[in-house]
Image (cartoon, grey):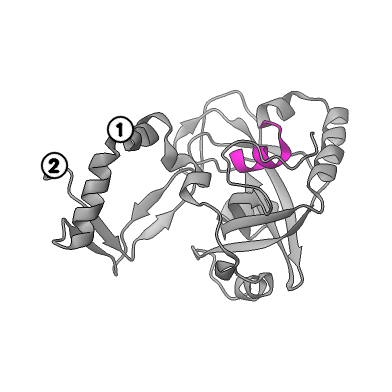
Amino acid sequence: MASMPIIIAVRVRVITQNYLSLSTQPSSVIIVAPAVLETKKLDDWSNANVSELVRMVFDDMAYRDPCILLPPVRDATLTMISNLVSESRSVTAGDQGTFWIKGRVEIAWPSAWFWHMACPHCYELYEFSSTLGIICLSCGQGMHEFPRAWVRLTVFNSTGYVNVIALGPEAEKLICLSATDMYRVSEDETFEISKRVSRRLDGKELLCYLKHSSRMIRTEKFTRYTIVACYPVSGSASSQYIPFGDSV
């Protein structure tokens, strides 16, 4: 369709923080409405499925769901944890590489609270709680802080181990509790929650898609890699809570 041409982007930067984002870099190439057979096939497919595509984008906001953007992959595409650890010693702080890994997990900080205060715009953690409007030092927008879930895991297999962190919805899927619920409980209840989450997760096998953590997370949580999406190895992809079998 002339009003909605097919656009092909090559060597663009893909960011999956909070939602799917594409941006160009010096080596990027953008082609608008190329005259090739694949373009005609894609155009025909989009016309045949336009109602479903509109629903996914405007109603379901599929571009914000990692389980749709990043479905599970085959073992052939996995990165060995030993290679990941070796690479982490040489990458720069701004490296944007991503990796699929698979292994069993344990809670890295079993006695920690599984939430922190964060900016509602960029989701970066903040160091203090406040009911007053303040300016986020990461994105510069005015905000009221809100609780955001997190859980730090050690993923290990026969090749090695690596510490990772799950934030926001991915953390809530793993622990089956919302940050708001945890924010309201007492310290004694938080300790009990920590024990139940450890029983739920320790020893489970996960397939995880990782990215390099933001500078704030690396500094405050001492974790180089953040989970973008994860799946139980024996289960199927789902955007709902992951059914590991033990209820929290």
Total numbered badges shown on the rendered structure? 2
Q: Nearer the viewer, residue 44 or 172?
A: 44
Label 2 to label 1, Cα distance in Å? 17 Å
Asked which quadrant contains residue 12, the reply is bottom left
Q: Which mark is residue 153?
A: none
- Give, as a single range, the part of the protein colored magenta: 169-178
118 vs 152: above or below: above
**Residue 218, visible in the rendered structure:** no
Residue 54 picture location, percent across and down: 32, 34
The disc labelled 1 sits on which kind of residue? Answer: Ser
Residue 14: give x, y in percent of width and height: 41, 56
* Residue under numbered circle 2: 3
Is residue 16 placed above or below 136 in the rendered structure?
Answer: below
Task: Please identify the residue farthest to the left as the structure is shown.
Answer: 2
Badge 2 amino acid: Ser
- At 74% from the left and 23% from the top, the residue drawn is 184
Q: Residues within 10 Å of mark 1 (few under 14, many from 20)?
A: few
Q: Residue at x 67, y 41 (%)?
A: 242
Residue 127's x, y, as percent? Answer: 65, 40
Residue plotted at (58% across, 76% down): 90
Which of 132 and 147 lies nearest the eye of the viewer?
A: 147
Chain-order first, disc 2 or disc 1: 2
The quadrant where residue 212 appears: bottom right
Which of the labelled discs sits on residue 51, or is there none? 1
| Residue 75, horizontal then vertical, whole percent | 60, 66
| The quarter of the displayed image where residue 81 is located | bottom right
Q: Is residue 195 visible?
A: yes
Question: Dividing the image into 4 quarters, which one contains the N terminus?
Answer: top left
- Tell me the element at label 2: loop
